[in-house]
Image: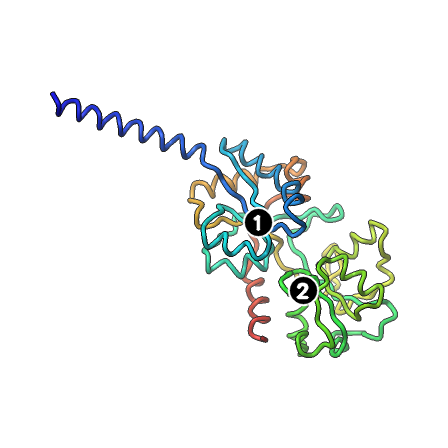
């Protein structure tokens, strides 16, 4: 009799455990880390609707985790997030170390243009004596941040490939903090040369803050891309899966992103036109390697 009761107990325990684990899986929280370059509040505004859209699709709670640059690697190392939205440079630098996998690449919504790549712009005041890249040697150069891919590292690589190391060959190589600060510093003559991501000058002109005719782009590339740029083009930000996200979850989240229509509330809030197949981030890694090898 005791053996019979023990057998029944074990069977019931197995069933309850199986059912409980299924419920736990369905209710477990999905955490999306986001590079909060403009602060936590802006990150929630921009990406909160995306979290809700994924939550509605998967019937699971989804939370946005705003991260500063210095917070991203610890979050990956401790497996505190399942997915990561960050700039192309940071993704490429962390990809192998933390086994990140780009599921999609954003097609950005910029000045009513849909763009899945971006570049760096090197610019001076219109009346500057700086005419081409070689003239930047010995001048005051401002980037957004040394860690900013579009607002620093793209131009950094271009200069290195033209025999100029900004760290040693410029009178100053400093950070402006934001793209707008860099543009205004050049306009006001505080620095000789600035570099920002493509579409910055066009956006500021549309806002009535500058006239692009007041500036001259150095090494301007004439192609079909919608915005002025000095460097080659690189893929936009990825939506990446972290080690803690299993294959099935990755598939479901990727599908939820790819099926969003361009007028979806989540895309409008994020200022994204759509999510597309992941770009080739090896070109981003190449850029970072050029800079690393020059130090």
Q: Secondary structure at mark 2?
A: helix
Q: Which mark is residue 85?
A: 1
Q: Residue at x 47, y 60 (%)?
A: 96
- Taking the image as shown, residue 167 lies to the left or right of residue 58, namely right
Write down the quadrant of residue 3 in the picture.
top left
Horizontal arrangement in the rendering, residue 58 relative to residue 184 (left or right) = left
- Image quarter where the C terminus lies is bottom right
Observer-nearest of 66 and 193: 66
Point 29% across, 27% down: residue: 15
Q: CA distance from mark 1 to mark 2?
A: 19 Å
* Mark positioned earlier in the residue sequence (1 or 2): 1
Is 63 positioned to the left or the right of 1 in the image? Answer: right
Q: Is residue 129 above or below residue 35?
A: below
Q: What is the quadrant of the N terminus in the image?
A: top left
Position of residue 230 relative to residue 51, above or below, is below
Q: Residues within 10 Å of mark 1 (few under 14, many from 20)?
A: many
- Measured as percent of width and height from the top left, residue 262 is found at 66, 39
Q: Is residue 155 visible?
A: yes
Image: 279 above or below 218: above
Give the label on residue 152, or none.
2
Residue 123: x percent and y percent?
78, 66
User: In the image, 189: left or right of 44?
Assistant: right
Q: Count the numbered circles shown.
A: 2
């Amino acid at each position: 009799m005791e053996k019979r009761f023990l057998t029944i107990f074990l069977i019931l325990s197995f069933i309850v455990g199986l059912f409980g684990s299924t419920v736990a899986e369905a209710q477990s929280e999905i955490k999306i880390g986001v590079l909060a370059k403009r602060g936590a509040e802006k990150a929630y505004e921009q990406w909160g609707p995306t979290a809700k859209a994924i939550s509605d699709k998967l019937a699971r709670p989804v939370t946005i985790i705003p991260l500063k640059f210095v917070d991203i690697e610890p979050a990956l190392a401790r497996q505190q997030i399942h997915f990561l939205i960050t700039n192309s440079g940071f993704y490429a630098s962390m990809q192998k170390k933390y086994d990140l996998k780009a599921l999609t690449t954003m097609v950005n919504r910029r000045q009513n243009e849909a763009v899945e790549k971006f570049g760096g712009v090197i610019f001076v005041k219109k009346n500057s004596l700086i005419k081409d890249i070689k003239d930047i040697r010995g001048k005051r150069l401002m980037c957004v941040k040394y860690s900013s891919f579009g607002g620093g590292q793209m131009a950094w690589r271009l200069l290195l490939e033209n025999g100029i190391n900004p760290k040693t060959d410029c009178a100053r190589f400093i950070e402006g903090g934001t793209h707008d600060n860099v543009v205004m510093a050049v306009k006001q003559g505080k620095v000789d040369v600035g570099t920002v991501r493509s579409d910055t000058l066009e956006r500021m002109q549309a806002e009535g803050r500058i006239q692009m005719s007041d500036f001259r782009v150095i090494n301007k590339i004439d192609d079909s891309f919608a915005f002025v740029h000095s460097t080659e083009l690189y893929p936009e930000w990825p939506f990446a899966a972290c080690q803690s996200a299993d294959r099935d979850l990755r598939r479901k989240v990727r599908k939820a992103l790819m099926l969003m229509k361009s007028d979806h509330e989540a895309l409008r809030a994020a200022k994204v036109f759509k999510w597309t197949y992941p770009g080739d981030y090896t070109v981003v890694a190449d850029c970072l390697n050029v800079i690393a090898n020059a130090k």
